[in-house]
Amino acid sequence: MGASLTGMDTPLTTTFPTTAFLGLGAMGFPMAGHLAARSRETGGRTLVWNRTPARAAAHAAEFGSVAATLEEAAGADLIVSCLPTSAEVDGVLDAVRGHLKPGSVWVDCTSGHPDAAPEQRARLLEAGVRFLDAPVSGGTVAAKAGTLTVMVGGPAQEIEAVRPHLAFAGKLVRVGDTGAGFAVKAVNNALLAVNLWAAGEGLAILGLRGVELGAALDVINASSGRSNTTENLIPQRVLTRQFPATFGLGLLAKDAGIALDLAEQARGSAPVIAQVTALYRAASRVIGAQEDHTAALKLIEQWNGVELK
């Protein structure tokens, strides 16, 4: 308790001349680009780090950021991370111990586990660094456009301090205390999983009946069965047979599992989320964890002997 109070007594930085972005994946690469553009406008600089240094060098060449070591990035005034899971974030926290700047803020855009957030915040407060769990939604299209939805857990004052600097956000909402951002993200992605799977099953039934699936989607998308999966994901990725690798199938299975963890911890009843979690775990094993999440529908195709096209 004493360590946390000491950390909270450290003055909160409200200006961020140096920002850092950790993790340059499909989402992180364009997100960091928006930070770099904003830094140039305000006379600051953005450091970027990735486990593969060549990725950081490519980002610097494209966006004018500065490729940095992890230790250098840890000394920034504002640190944004976007890593696969909370476990990777914990590993980074271990590596940067002793290199952090008191008064800075760490914004974690990882789709993390709500249980990890309080522990990560406590660890950082020992160094005088605030921590906000701030996962994002909108996919690579919104990441490139700088219009991501950010759901943030943490103290309101800290969120307001960083709000103007998160240039990749089109909408930023405080959803509660520490861990709430991760919780909302998990449930949001569980709903994505449910909608995608249900639409896949429905289209497989129609395909077996000889219905033209593009025309069927035109009707569904003008009716009560529509969702983002029917309006965008299935027409653009499934019917075209492209399945571009943007958000991994294994990661969606992980997020659905987190939502199920939350239900079990609360002793709630969520049988649909439980079932869809099992289905996506199976799809991840059979189809491949690195495949795009929309490729989960290939398992439905296999079970029904029909191709969605």
Image (cartoon, helix red, strand yellow):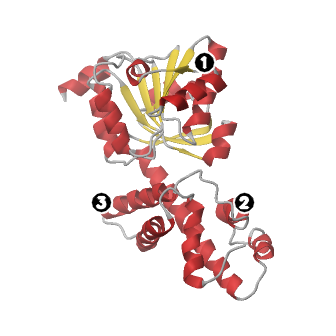
The residue carrying mark 3 is 265
Q: Quadrant of the C terminus?
A: bottom right
* Distance from the alpha carbon under mark 1 to that under mark 2: 34 Å
Please, is residue 75 above or below residue 267 in the view? above
Whether residue 195 appears in this view of the structure is: no
Inspect the image, locate mark 3, and give the three-letter code of the amino acid beneath it: Gln
Tell me the quarter of the picture where residue 257 sits.
bottom left
Q: Residue at x 50, y 55 (%)?
A: 290
Where 53 falls versus 138 (above or below)? above
Q: Nearer the viewer, mark 3 or mark 2?
A: 2
Residue for badge 1: 39
Q: Nearer the viewer, mark 1 or mark 3?
A: 1
Image mark for residue 236? 2
Question: In the displayed structure, would residue 203 be above or below residue 35?
Answer: below
- The residue closer to the viewer here, 86 or 59, is 59
Locate the N terminus and report the quarter of the image it occupies. Answer: top left
Instruction: Rate crowding at label 2 as few (under 14), some (14 to 19) or many (20 or more) other CA atoms within 10 Å.
Output: some
Which badge, 1 or 2, comes first in the chain's sequence? 1
Give how far apart the Cα atoms at labels 3 and 2 are.
Answer: 37 Å
Q: Which x, y percent locates residue 101?
A: 36, 16
Amino acid carrying label 2: it is Gln
Q: Nearer the viewer, mark 1 or mark 2?
A: 2
Q: First in sequence: mark 1 or mark 3?
A: 1
At x 44%, y 16%, the residue is 13
Q: Residues within 10 Å of mark 1 (few under 14, many from 20)?
A: many
**In x, y percent, where is residue 55?**
54, 32
Number of numbered callouts drawn: 3
The secondary element bearing badge 2 is classed as: helix
Q: Secondary structure at mark 3?
A: helix
The residues tagged by marks 1 and 3 sit, at their Cα atoms, a distance apart of 41 Å
